[in-house]
Image (cartoon, rainbow, N blue to C red):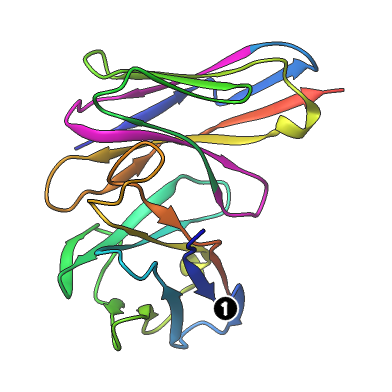
Amino acid sequence: KQEVTQIPAALSVPEGENLVLNCSFTDSAIYNLQWFRQDPGKGLTSLLLIQSSQREQTSGRLNASLDKSSGRSTLYIAASQPGDSATYLCAVLRRGSARQLTFGSGTQLTVLP
Amino acid sequence: EPEVTQTPSHQVTQMGQEVILRCVPISNHLYFYWYRQILGQKVEFLVSFYNNEISEKSEIFDDQFSVERPDGSNFTLKIRSTKLEDSAMYFCASMNPRDRGQSGANVLTFGAGSRLTVL
């Protein structure tokens, strides 16, 4: 059974800092890994998706990496802003007929002005 | 850009009542999903649906839950007799395994969610 773990559970940083969020998964038989952002009480906003054959993806100040063999991904946020404050979720899409997405518990990020 | 649409955005119901949550997936997608998120907890998989049948379901998806694709466009989740612990945000998602998204295939697109409150 696929397990997805995110560390840390919560993170508070001053504005302008660069930061790294971590995600690990137990089963490397995946199609892809996706990072989402979730604001309190809201839906899921997809940030970046990395296919299993890729090593990283970049979008603006965000960079996500994937090491499938070790079961790890990182989300790097450069020059953090208060507007980045949210919960960041990592999810992996399992290979197979069902193609089920398994989520981590998330990292709650607070960027202090 | 195509969207997954969910209705209602928020529903309040009494314990024991039946609830139907509706979703309109993206039109050329083949896989359909329901996920739920209890307040403060992880997003959990409920059920996946492919080729007009359930392809996988979690242990949460017991006899009180059912899914249907009644007319080729809607995808519904029914809870027969709601319990207090069914209060959660319910997310619908769809996917086309051959969809050439920004990074290739197998991209799940989520709806904005339906918040269910059981009193």
Judge from the rendering whether residue B36 lies leftward or rightward of residue B57; answer left or right. right
Quadrant the C terminus of chain B occupies:
bottom right
Between residue B84 and residue B75, name the one nearer to us: B75
Above-or-below relation of B30 to A103 = below
Residue B53 location, quadrant: bottom left
Between residue B83 and residue A50, name the one nearer to us: A50
Above-or-below relation of B25 to B96 = below
* Residue occupying the point 78% across, 13% down: A16
Q: Which residues are magenta?
A: A19-44
Between residue A54 and residue A10, name the one nearer to us: A54
State the residue position of label 1: B8
Q: Is residue B60 magenta?
A: no
* Image location of residue A56, percent across then percent down: 40, 19
* Image location of residue B85, percent across then percent down: 47, 65
Question: What amino acid is found at the position of numbered circle 1 in the picture?
Answer: Pro
Residue B71 location, quadrant: bottom left
* Image location of residue A94, percent across then percent down: 22, 40
* Residue occupying the point 42% across, 54% down: B109
* Residue occupying the point 46% across, 84% down: B19
Above-or-below relation of A94 to A53 = below
Seen as rendered, the residue at the extreme left is: A97
Secondary structure under the numbered disc 1 in the rendered image: loop
Q: Is residue A34 magenta?
A: yes
Main SS of the magenta part reads strand
* Image location of residue B24, percent across then percent down: 43, 75
Chain letter for mark 1: B
Between residue B67 and residue B80, name the one nearer to us: B67
Residue B116 location, quadrant: bottom right
